[in-house]
Amino acid sequence: MTWTATGTLNAEAAARHPELVAPAVARGLGLFDAEVAATVGVAEIDPDLADTAAFCERYAVAPEASANCVVVKGKRGGDVRYAACLVLATTRADVNGIVRRRLDVRSASFAPMDEAVALTGMEYGGITPIGLPADWPILVDAAVAAAPEVVIGGGVRGSKLFLPGSALLALPGAELVEGLGRAAG
């Protein structure tokens, strides 16, 4: 497979390089059927350049080809619910509207960094929807799902994954959500 959104990076089949991703991500990749797994590439990057803007600039990757995964925490009374939201890097997740309603909670916000890291088993700045807790909904913006290829985290700051946006819908708990990503600004 040849990945096209890699900019100056050379991606290789992620299934053959589990050492480049977080252990939770390697397990998550193993849940894909062989056809979907073959569409996932991985490339090693400088961990100091994992944040989207720095990554895109250094490796000549278009921001509109990058998707960010954010962990959202919602509360209703004493009940706490989590979800992962995947939106293009050029947009922001509608946490207080769509996500709050989907989780059926009174309040929703980004999960604190230490909590997100502990719950996912991934590094902050590398959190990705692949390998998340099985009971979490993974809300995938329609624009991400429609993208021919997106760049997402590898669970560690030192790698990125490349795959068709539609492959994300094969993840356990994945849901296509129209309008999840709102224009940034």
Image (cartoon, rainbow, N blue to C red):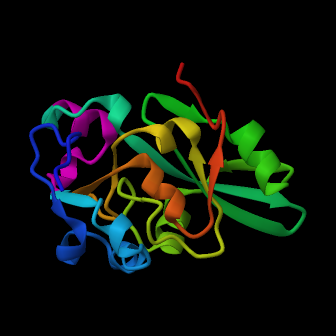
Residue 47 image-quadrant placement: bottom left
The residue under the point 14% across, 52% down is 46
Residue farthest toward the front in the current orientation of the protein? 35
What secondary structure is the magenta-colored segment mainly? helix
Q: Nearer the viewer, residue 107 or 23?
A: 23
Q: Which of 149 and 137 is in front in this view?
A: 149
Q: Can residue 158 be seen in this view?
A: no
The x and y percentages for residue 5 are 23, 39
Q: Range of the magenta residues?
A: 44-57
The residue under the point 33% across, 79% down is 23
Classify residue 179 as left or right of residue 123: right
> In the rendered structure, does residue 155 fall within the stretch colored magenta?
no
The x and y percentages for residue 153 are 34, 55
Q: Report the quarter where the C terminus lies.
A: top right
Residue 24 image-quadrant placement: bottom left
Residue farthest toward the top in the current orientation of the protein? 185
Residue 7 sits above or below residue 9 on the image: above
Q: Which of 114 and 3 is in front in this view?
A: 3
Q: Report the quarter where the N terminus lies.
A: bottom left
The x and y percentages for residue 48 are 20, 49
Residue 158 image-quadrant placement: bottom left
Residue 42 sits above or below residue 68 on the image: below
The residue under the point 30% across, 33% down is 53
- Count of marks, rendered view: 0
The residue under the point 41% across, 74% down is 33
Classify residue 90 as left or right of residue 66: right
